[in-house]
Amino acid sequence: MASQEAAPEAARTAESARAAVSVWTRSLEAILDNPALFMAGILLAMWAILSRLSPFFFTLDNLFEITIQAAVIALIAVGQTFVILSGGIDLSVGAVLAATTVVASLAMDAGHGLAPGLVAGLLCGALFGAANGIAVGKLGIPPFIATLGMMGIARGFALIVTGGIPVFNLAPGFEVLGQGRVWDILPVPTLTTLALYALGYLILTRTRLGRYTYSIGSSLQATVFSGVNVPRYLILIYTVSGFTTAIAGLTEASRIGSGQPAGGSGYELDSIAAVVIGGTSLFGGEGNLFASLVGALIIATLRNGLNVLGVYAFWQQVAIGAILIAAVYLDRWRRRRRGE
């Protein structure tokens, strides 16, 4: 009699176990299929591990320092996300950042004041971005070649107009953009980054530019056949990249107190890494803007954590490169899972 009563109970227990396993499996699949969620989990795991390895890591001051360190790359990554979502790439952002900083700095050095200097820098970045868009959208030059050429043009421009000499005479108040704190707590670069990501999110999700950015990256031919003026939107997409790079350049110039014609070196790779690590597909048409912010924070966390642990600086590049390769492999693995 007891064995007969135990049999249904055992069956119910087994069924509950199978249901629990099924829930965990579905949850794991949902996380793996959502790059933003997956990389956010990686970021939290990194924070947990580094806080155990060093008592100095998980402090409010250090966490704010991570957001400040991430700000410039994160700001560039906003525009880079638009470009990569459209199926392109922008290799000129580091050089455009340098050109932006020297144009703004020269305007302020000439006595034109803070506001004209900021406007000059923003216009400089937007114009370089628009030139990239014209080369890609109107002239049909592959994004890799067009932006690689613009990298040389922008870097040469920055060096020519300054003679290769940094510009230090900046307008009073400019330092607030890169060094200021609201209520002596919240860093201005962090708030600028959050505001730009919120604006970028609204553009990507609520405007035609956002919809067509995804559409162009998903299927260029289908977008053309649907009657969309693709060259026009490509110009807008690359202009966005130049504009957000200009904001990043002004933030960096404010933080270091000078316009550097040799600045921004390697930022194109860091911004691409942030976007790809965040889960945006290099094939275009798939990605999430806030995931790019997570990617930038992962890079900054890695560098900050290795510094806190006293790891040799050059190993940071090795670690970032390894994470980038792993992120691209994960993207390809997810696509194979879905049969794409």
Image: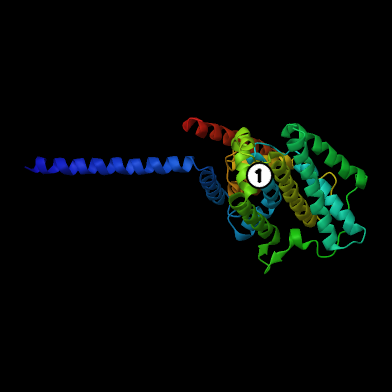
Residue placed at 54% from the left, 35% from the top?
330
Amino acid marked by disc 1: Phe
* Picture coordinates of residue 69, whole percent (x, y): 69, 51
Residue 301 visible in the shown view: no
- Color style of the picture: rainbow
Location of the N terminus (image quadrant): top left
Q: Position of residue 224 (x, y in %)?
A: 64, 36
For numbered disc 1, what is the local secondary structure? helix
Residue 260 at what x, y percent from top left? 84, 48
* Mark 1 crowdedness (10 Å alpha carbons): few <14, some 14-19, many ≥20: many
Q: Is residue 316 left or right of residue 49?
A: right
Q: Position of residue 43 (x, y in %)?
A: 56, 47
**327 or 321, nearer to the observer:** 327
Residue 15 can be seen, yes or no? yes
Q: Nearer the viewer, residue 243 or 160?
A: 243
Q: Residue furthest bottom?
A: 183
Question: Compared to 278, does 139 lie above or below?
Answer: above
Count of numbered tags: 1
Q: Nearer the viewer, residue 227 or 44?
A: 227
The residue carrying mark 1 is 82
Query: Which of the pair 178/80 is nearer the observer?
Result: 80
Examine the rendered structure and indicate whether residue 318 appears above or below residue 183.
above
- Dividing the picture into quadrants, the one containing residue 115 is bottom right
